[in-house]
Amino acid sequence: MHLFYEPHITGNTVELNEEESFHAIKVLRLKTGDVVRLTDGKGSFYDAEIAGIMGKKAELLITAKQEQTAPKAHLHIAMAPTKSIERFEFFLEKATETGIAAITPIVCDRSERRQIREDRLMKVVVSAAKQSLKAWMPRFDELTPFSKFVNSPTLPQHKYIALVR
């Protein structure tokens, strides 16, 4: 069964966004009446049926909902994006697949990459979560200076730093 991501599910009908609709209609060639699965990224899976296709949008009728328990461990990783963005995207993909709770890209004094396309990186996270059938989407924060991240009052008391060479 195909899994789609829609973060704003309210009521019994859902209209997939343009990108997810394109994937369902054009790539997978799904038709009215086909059964699919949705996740809201907040711990729920939904069984749904394609109720209609209007132009470039697919409308789904939710038939069932399954709640998933929250992960017991809450791991938050902060990492400076690498010079090669493909390596950072690979990290995001694998971290999401293993069940990370939050990811914060940080800028350090000697960072080579000081700008990122957050929308592109969020697509990598969403894709990895769908691929690994995760009901919980990791929180992806905006690019943050290292000093601001380390001094954040919302972080737990225990913080660890790893250096990989």
Image (tube, rainbow, N blue to C red):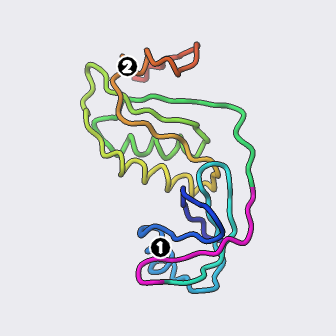
Q: Residue at x 30, y 41 (%)?
A: 116
Q: Which residues are magenta?
A: 54-66
Query: Measured from the top left, where is residue 19 in percent x and y?
Result: 42, 67
On residue 114, which mark appears? Answer: none
Residue on which the image places disc 1: 21
Residue at the extreme front of the image, as rendered: 11
The amino acid pointed to by label 1 is: Ser
Residue on which the image places disc 2: 148
Q: Residue at x 52, y 22 (%)?
A: 154
Q: Is residue 158 above or below residue 78?
A: above
User: In terms of depth relative to the viewer, which is nearer, 42 or 77?
Assistant: 42
User: In terms of depth relative to the viewer, which is nearer, 107 or 165?
Assistant: 107
Callout 2 secondary element: helix
Give the position of the N terminus as an image quadrant: bottom right
Question: Where, by quadrant of the figure, is residue 75 drawn?
Answer: top right
Q: Main secondary structure of the magenta part?
A: strand
Q: Earlier in the sequence, mark 1 or mark 2?
A: 1
Q: Are marks 1 and 2 in contact (CB under 8 Å)?
A: no
